[in-house]
Image (cartoon, grey):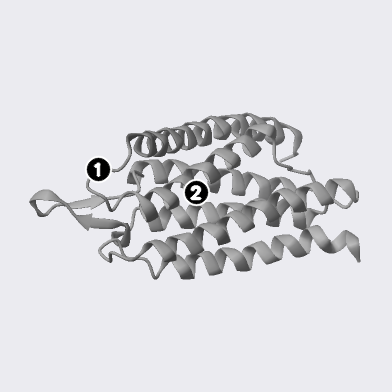
Amino acid sequence: MSRYIPNLLTVGRFFMAIGFFVVLAFYDAEEAAGWPVLDIATVIFLVAVCTDMVDGYLARRLGHVTAFGRIADPFVDKIIICGALAYFIGGQFARVGEGGAAENLTGWAPWMVVVVLARELLVTGMRSFSESHKVPFAATLSGKVKMFIQCVAVTWVLVYVGHYAGGANPPAWMVVGRDISIWAATLFTALSGLVYIKRGYHLLRMVPG
């Protein structure tokens, strides 16, 4: 039974992702008391991140790395990250600024989200192709680093928007930290995508037809 724990954690993380999105749906930047919603979302997100680390460790420790785990684990990761970014560029994370223009509080630009989505869709397609030809397609170190930085960026934005963005002058270190984490996540996502493209090229040469 214990060998199935990693896969059960992955399934549990999927439902946590759904809960995370449901909570985010209740947030409105125009509401002064929106921080409890984002605090709850942050806790759910961090618990999900912890289960991601635990299920991978247990799968290796128990010697039960399955095709389901190799596919479902990164898939759920992509759902929770890409879903968070989709919410971040939405209208509920924007408020009316000076001059009546809408101001997004998260710092994420739409083109950044496009970069992340494109990379994740590309890698998902490559993984599906690889596994369909019975060739394991486990995550690489660059992919794990990318995921870690993305998690830092999402967490930082949730805390920043929930506790600092509503003030007239948010602390400079929070703003700088937000921007650095966002740019780092975008850059490392793109770079890790290049690593996977190279890997995919070699895969295509291995697979007949």
* Residue 132 visible, this angle: no
Residue 50 location in percent, x, y? 67, 52
> From the image, which quarter does the N terminus lie in?
bottom right
Report the side of 173 relative to 195 (left or right). left
Question: 136 above or below 18?
Answer: above
Q: Amino acid at mark 2?
A: Thr
* Residue 103 visible, this angle: yes
Question: 23 above or below 68?
Answer: below
Question: 172 above or below 98?
Answer: above
* Front position among marks 2 and 1: 1
Q: How many marks?
A: 2
Report the side of 179 relative to 103 (left or right). right
> From the image, which quarter does the C terminus lie in?
top right
* Disc 2, SS: helix
- Of 178 and 92, nearer the camera is 178
Which numbered marker is on residue 21? none
Q: Residue at x 73, y 43 (%)?
A: 137
Tell me if mark 1 has few (under 14), some (14-19) or many (20+) residues whose alpha carbon lies within 10 angstroms of its own: few
Tell me if mark 2 has few (under 14), some (14-19) or many (20+) residues whose alpha carbon lies within 10 angstroms of its own: many
* Disc 1, SS: loop
Residue 64 location in percent, x, y? 88, 52
Q: Amino acid at mark 1?
A: Asn
Quadrant position of residue 173: top left
- Of 138 and 51, nearer the camera is 51
Residue at mark 2 to residue at mark 1: CA–CA distance: 21 Å
Q: Residue at x 42, y 32 (%)?
A: 180
- Of 192 and 160, nearer the camera is 160
Q: Residue at x 43, y 38 (%)?
A: 182
Residue 31 location in percent, x, y? 28, 66
The residue tagged 2 is: 155
Which numbered marker is on residue 169? 1
Residue 105 location in percent, x, y? 30, 50
